[in-house]
Image (tube, rainbow, N blue to C red):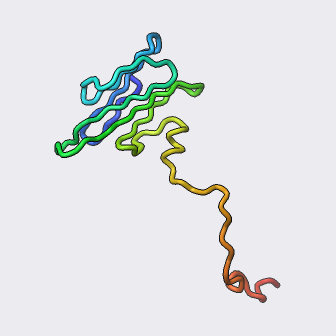
Amino acid sequence: MKLISFNIDNDILEVHNNMWTGVETVTFNGYEVSRQFNWFRGDHDFAISTDDGNGTDYYRVVILMGMAGITVDVYRNEETLLAQSSEAKRRSRPNRSRNARRSRVTNPEALYHEEDLV
C-alpha cells in the first residue's frame, strides 16, 4: 500500500508499506533506495547526490505505527520536510524555554498614569 508520494523539488519520494508482511519500501524517483522489515517503527536512511553533482543530500524517512494510525516523517540533512507524527512536529518547532521568567518592566511609570486610574 502506498503511504505517501512526496514531491521534493523535481524529485518524487514514495513510501510503500505492506501491513501483512511488515515490509516497508522507500523509492526515490522510481528507484528503490531502502527496504526493511518492521512492524511498529522503521528508520530508513539513504544518501542521494544533489542535482548539480557537487554534494550529497542525506535523507531519513521514519515510519511509525501507533494508535492514531501510520505516520511518515521525512528529513533532508536533518531538516524536517514532512512532519506527520507528534514527535516530528515537536522537533520542527523552534526551541523555547517553558519555565523562563518574564523580564520585569524597568520603567513602571510608562505603564499607566495617575489620572488613568480614576
In the image: residue 23, left or right of residue 101: left
In depth, the one of 57 and 20 nearer the eye is 57
Return the residue found at the far right: 118
In depth, the one of 11 and 23 nearer the eye is 23
Residue at 24% x, 25% y: name it.
31
Q: Position of residue 58 (x, y in %)?
A: 32, 39
Residue at 65% x, 61% y: name it.
100
Q: Quarter of the image containing the N terminus?
A: top left
Q: Where is residue 47 in the image (x, y as percent from the top left)?
A: 29, 35
In the image: residue 102, left or right of residue 20: right
Is residue 84 placed above or below 109 in the rendered structure? above
Residue at 51% x, 42% y: name it.
89
Q: Position of residue 59 (x, y in %)?
A: 34, 36
Q: Where is residue 14 in the image (x, y as percent from the top left)?
A: 33, 28
Is residue 29 placed above or below 94 in the rendered structure? above
Q: Quarter of the image containing the C terminus?
A: bottom right
Return the residue found at the far left: 53
